[in-house]
Amino acid sequence: MQTTTYPVTGMTCGHCVTSVTAEVSRIPGVTGVTVDLAGGTVTVDSETPVDREAVRAAVDEAGYELGEAS
């Protein structure tokens, strides 16, 4: 199991959480997505490492900006 947490800027409400969760969940190989609105992060669980650019594209599609992974 691989778990990576990324900062996400621009999220302000529950709709933001829903949008980011839906888009990131569509990435092949992703098994779980947890969005922390207060902390401004998205945590991605997967069986194998997920390409960071795929996560960035999904977050961009949701209307937000991805920061550097921690």
Image (tube, helix red, strand yellow):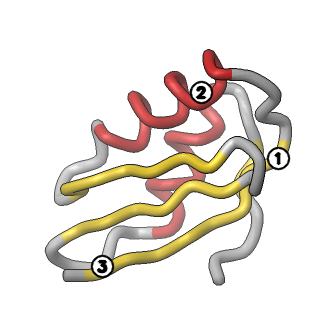
Q: Position of residue 33 (x, y in %)?
A: 38, 50
The reply to whether the C-beta atoms of the residues labelled 3 and 2 are less than 8 Å apart is no
- Residue at numbered disc 2: 62
**Which is in the foreground here, disc 1 or disc 2?**
1
Residue plotted at (63% across, 66% down)? 6
Query: Mark 3 to mark 2: distance in Å?
Result: 21 Å
Q: Position of residue 38 (x, y in %)?
A: 77, 47
Q: Position of residue 53 (x, y in %)?
A: 52, 61
Residue plotted at (73% across, 36% down)? 64
Please state which amino acid type lies under the numbered disc 2.
Ala
Query: Mark 1 to mark 2: distance in Å?
Result: 11 Å
Secondary structure beneath dot 2 equals helix
The reply to whether the C-beta atoms of the residues labelled 1 and 2 are less than 8 Å apart is no
Compared to residue 17, the image places residue 49 above or below, namely below
Residue plotted at (65% across, 83% down)? 70
Image-based side of 32 in relation to 56, left or right: left
Q: Determine the image quadrant of residue 31.
A: bottom left
Please state which amino acid type lies under the numbered disc 3.
Pro
Secondary structure beneath dot 1 equals strand
* Chain-order first, disc 3 or disc 1: 1
- Residue at numbered disc 1: 9
Residue situated in front as seen by the camera: 37 or 25: 37
Compared to residue 62, the image places residue 69 above or below, namely below
Q: Determine the image quadrant of residue 5.
A: bottom right
Q: Position of residue 52 (x, y in %)?
A: 50, 68
* Chain-order first, disc 1 or disc 2: 1
Residue farthest along the front direction in this orientation: 38
Secondary structure beneath dot 3 equals loop
Query: Mark 3 to mark 1: distance in Å?
Result: 22 Å
Badge 1 crowding class, 10 Å Cα cut-off, few under 14, some 14 to 19, many 20 or more, is: some
Image-based side of 38 in relation to 32, left or right: right
- Residue at numbered disc 3: 49
